[in-house]
Image (cartoon, rainbow, N blue to C red):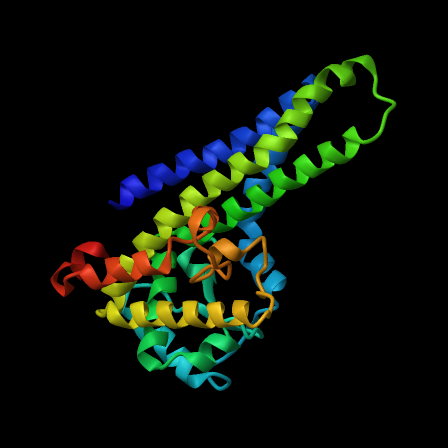
Amino acid sequence: MKMRNQVRTIVLLGLLSTVLVVAGGSLGGGWLLGSIVFAVALNLGAWLFSDRIVLRSTGAQEVGPAEAPRLHQLVAELAGRADLPMPKVAIVPSDEPNAFATGRSPERAVVAVSTGLLRVLDERELRGVIAHELAHVKNRDTLVATIAAMMGSAISGVAQVVQFGALFGGHSDEEEQGQGGGLLFALLAPIAATLVQLGISRQREYLADATGAAIAGDADGLASALQKIEAVGRWRAESGEPAEAHPATVALGIASPVMGGGLARWFSTHPPVAERVARLRRLDPATFARAA
């Protein structure tokens, strides 16, 4: 299961890199080498600095045991059950109830929770959420999700540059020839990148749910937490409060702040909460060891 999951992710990340390379080709031969270098540099940069970038972009602040004793105790206990080194612990100053884990390896992992999450969840539910995030660390999902999010954002950025450039004249003959392909890329590449990123994110969330249940020894805590997080998100949406989502890191959270049914559910970074809860409650505690 784990090996198959890793192979699928490598293939999907390869597709994202390919979109970047094809982008260069569509803009003309001179762009091809640059796009390859850009794809390699982006992957390397994400591998080296993913934790710092994510924490800075979300405003997360690292806290010690004296500042958050309950949170540290839960993380330490569950990290021990997962056979992981103790990660750093951070709190995000946000009313949005959410959590994420980041870092290029278990030794550099950071588990972050929002102030909103700490406020709305009880002990059992918080335990389930932390176990889910540690499952991402155990499955090496934190690096994968960060790379996918950054590459998706980069592809969208390149597409916007192409669209902006197409608004102005003054192209050479060679550039005019590549302009049609460039515009086609600008329209289609962000959609393709989004679909690939969603494919990575959804299958990893299902696996992290099962692995997290194994770590916590309890599936109901996470299931209840997911339902409560969804209920808060729905209430905020109905009351007209904007979601405090960070576009580049939304795939890292425990749940997507974007609510909606129909077609919208297929463009979410996470599977539907109802389906996740149903799968969790179908888990037999006797299978938790195999899920981990």
Left or right of residue 208, residue 58 in this image? right
For the point 38% across and 52% down, the residue is 140
Q: Position of residue 266 (x, y in %)?
A: 43, 46
Quarter of the image with the N terminus is top left
- Residue that protrudes farthest toward the left in the picture: 286
Q: How many marks?
A: 0
Quadrant assignment, res 225: bottom left
Left or right of residue 285, residue 47 in this image? right
Q: Position of residue 151 (x, y in %)?
A: 56, 42
Q: Position of residue 36 (x, y in %)?
A: 60, 28
Q: Is residue 259 above or below residue 94?
A: above
Quarter of the image with the C terminus is bottom left
Left or right of residue 158, residue 131 in this image? left
For the point 30% across and 67% down, the residue is 223
For the point 50% across and 45% down, the residue is 148
For the point 37% across and 67% down, the residue is 226
Quadrant assignment, res 159: top right
Q: Is residue 32 visible?
A: no
Left or right of residue 117, residue 291 in this image? left
Q: Is residue 113 above or below residue 135?
A: below
Q: Is residue 287 above or below residue 267?
A: below
Q: Is residue 230 visible?
A: yes
Query: Toward the viewer: 288 or 240?
Result: 240
Query: Toward the viewer: 140 or 161?
Result: 161
